[in-house]
Amino acid sequence: MPAMLIYPHINPVALQIGPVAIHWYGLTYLAAFGLFMLLGIRRLRHEPFASIQGPGAWTRKDVEDILFLGVAGVVAGGRLGYCLFYKPGYYLTHPLEIFAVWQGGMSFHGGLLGVIVAMLWFAHSRRRPWLQVADFVAPCVPTGLAAGRVGNFINGELWGRFASPDLPWGMVFAHSGSMQPRHPSQIYQFLMEGLLLFVLLWLYARRERRQGEVAAAFLVGYGAFRFIAEYFREPDAFLGLLSLGMSMGQWLCLPMIVAGVGLWLWAQRQPAVRSKNA
């Protein structure tokens, strides 16, 4: 039997300066925001955004504004989504605790809905097609998701299901209450929903596409990768597995995939858009 890997119990505080503690998780969020800005500025060179002129022209200021609104959408939507999707009964009877974000509890799918609302607001305020905004944003998101999974691993949270003792990378998370090896599902999600999705989406988006195609590819890609990863991730203890043996994460991914496929089919029926440089 191969030697089992033991989770190293990384100190969640990266730097302590007097009473001020800088947590690794906060640094991963900063990395996510920085990567979004970097990629957003690069995205300005892609078509059709590089060729749009006049009042609708895309600039660095747009990237900054989208980032600001997106962060607000992630925080508000992520928290409300967690309360609604995962513990609706509890928060219905303890409504003030909805605002206790320091207690933890965020949902990616809720955060996605929050970002969609933020993009709708941005598109309306700038008088731009909403799908054009969604296509711009989509390829810049996966690296932020990857950074978040690094934070999950450092915090030793969201560990995986039990793995075979013969799995070379099976890892023991002692604080899970068991000394049996588990799948390091945070790493799986880092690789699939983060790096792999980014590479595929970025390469796909570098060529001009019909409006809505890039956003559709993100919905289907993330939904599919997350659905697969959930088979290795330990479901929430207070929920367990739901109907058909699927987790809440998988059930939330299904409408995401369906919406992506529907958007893709709709986009295929639209006329191809040619940039001025084509």
Image: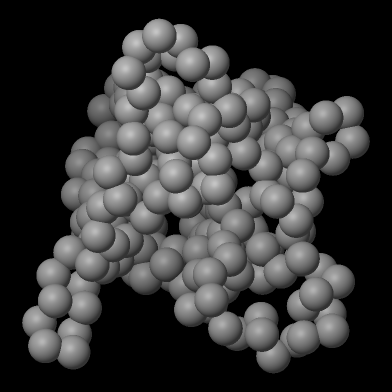
Quarter location, residue 12: bottom left
* Quarter of the figure that contains the N terminus: top left
Residue in the foreground of this view, choosing between 194 and 133: 194
Q: Position of residue 227 (x, y in %)?
A: 64, 29
Residue reaching furthest to the left: 17
Residue located 52% across and 30% down the image: 180
What colour scheme governs how the chains and residues are painted in the rendered image of this protein?
one colour
Residue reaching furthest to the right: 243
Q: In this view, does 237 lie to the left or right of 47?
A: right
Q: Is residue 150 left or right of residue 18?
A: right
Q: Position of residue 79 (x, y in %)?
A: 60, 69
Residue in the foreground of this view, choosing between 106 and 267: 106
Quarter location, residue 153: top left
Q: Position of residue 186 (x, y in %)?
A: 44, 38
* Quarter of the figure that contains the C terminus: top left
Number of disc labels = 0
Q: Where is residue 197 in the image (x, y as percent from the top left)?
A: 42, 28
Residue in the foreground of this view, choosing between 259 and 130: 259
Residue located 48% across and 79% down the image: 102
Residue located 70% across and 51% down the image: 237
Answer whether residue 205 is visible to the viewer in this image: no
Q: In this view, does 129 lie above or below 196?
A: below
